[in-house]
Image (cartoon, rainbow, N blue to C red):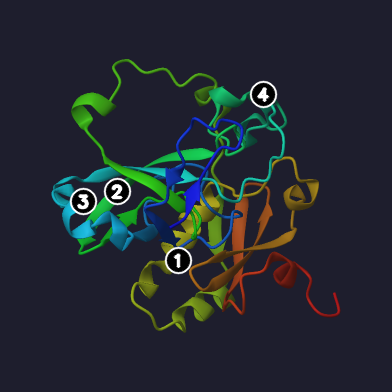
Amino acid sequence: MASIKNPEQSNTPGFKIIGVLESCFQEKFGTPRQPHLVPGSFARLKIYPQYAPEHSLAGLSDFSHVWLLSWFHLATNKTFHPKIHPPRLKGGKIGVFASRSPHRPSPIGLSLTKLERVEKDTLYLSGIDLISGTPILDVKPYLPISDIAANPLSGWVPLNAFPELKVDFTARALKEIARFDRPGAEDIPRLIADTLRHDPRNMRDKTQMKDGAELAFFMLNLEIKFTVAGDKATVLGVEAAVKFDKKFRRERPGA
């Protein structure tokens, strides 16, 4: 059984992984920055058998939403930085504890997701902001009587809102989507559009931010190719992914 330990604090017990999320998002690029930005996004979480899901999940199906505590297993920070660059600030800095950045002393994530249903040992979720393969540390039911704060303030966030992109599909992209014969295929255009609407690009990456640059991200078993010019994203094509590898995707033979 996998466990996560903090080598600097021997008195801190190891965190247990209760399951690994299977999400529609296959890589960090394209994964929403917050839950519910893409309502149609989905995932499932199978609870490991040693946690007796037939008993530990009893009663959970009566709740509409759950909190997921996750481990940011792909966080790359090697040292602690007290200030970080949130995408919303477009190069500006803010204290790490005034953000939800994955680059923190303990890379633990907190996501509020919609619980669609519980089947045996598996939770089916929507409104996901986590990449497939994310270790889950805990599941807690959402309680409106205590989880809704009175007169909340959102700090610097409302003053630095992301402008939403308009999203169009080329005729080629729509034709390619229509070829996919899979359950829920009719929802793929909306899933792609909602993901691109919130602009997945890194504001500090000049290559990504160049108008007309051709980019791509993986979703489900698909590779979505798109470009952004001004305030409009255009989906150029949607192909079956050969393998989920950035280097493979971005370095075409002969390029």
* CA distance for labels 1 and 2: 21 Å
Question: What amino acid is labelled 1 in the image?
Answer: Pro
Mark whose residue sits in front, 3 or 2:
3
Element on which disc 2 rests = strand
Q: Which residue is mark 1?
A: 189
Mark whose residue sits in front, 1 or 4:
4
Q: Is residue 79 left or right of residue 50?
A: right
Element on which disc 1 rests = helix
- In the rendered structure, are the residues bearing label 3 and label 1 in contact, judged by CB atoms less than 8 Å apart? no
Mark whose residue sits in front, 4 or 3:
3
Question: What amino acid is labelled 2 in the image?
Answer: Lys
Report whether residue 43 is seen: yes
Q: Which residue is mark 3?
A: 56
Q: Which residue is mark 4?
A: 82
Q: Is residue 215 left or right of residue 253?
A: left
Q: Is residue 22 above or below residue 67?
A: below
Q: Which badge, 4 or 3, is on the more N-terminal residue? A: 3
Q: Which mark is residue 114?
A: 2
Q: At 77% across and 50% down in the image, what residue appears?
A: 210
Q: Which badge, 1 or 2, is on the more N-terminal residue? A: 2
Q: Is residue 133 above or below residue 253?
A: above
* CA distance for labels 3 and 1: 37 Å
Element on which disc 3 rests = helix
> Around disc 1, counting alpha carbons within 10 Å, would you say few (fewer than 14), some (14 to 19), or many (20 or more)?
some
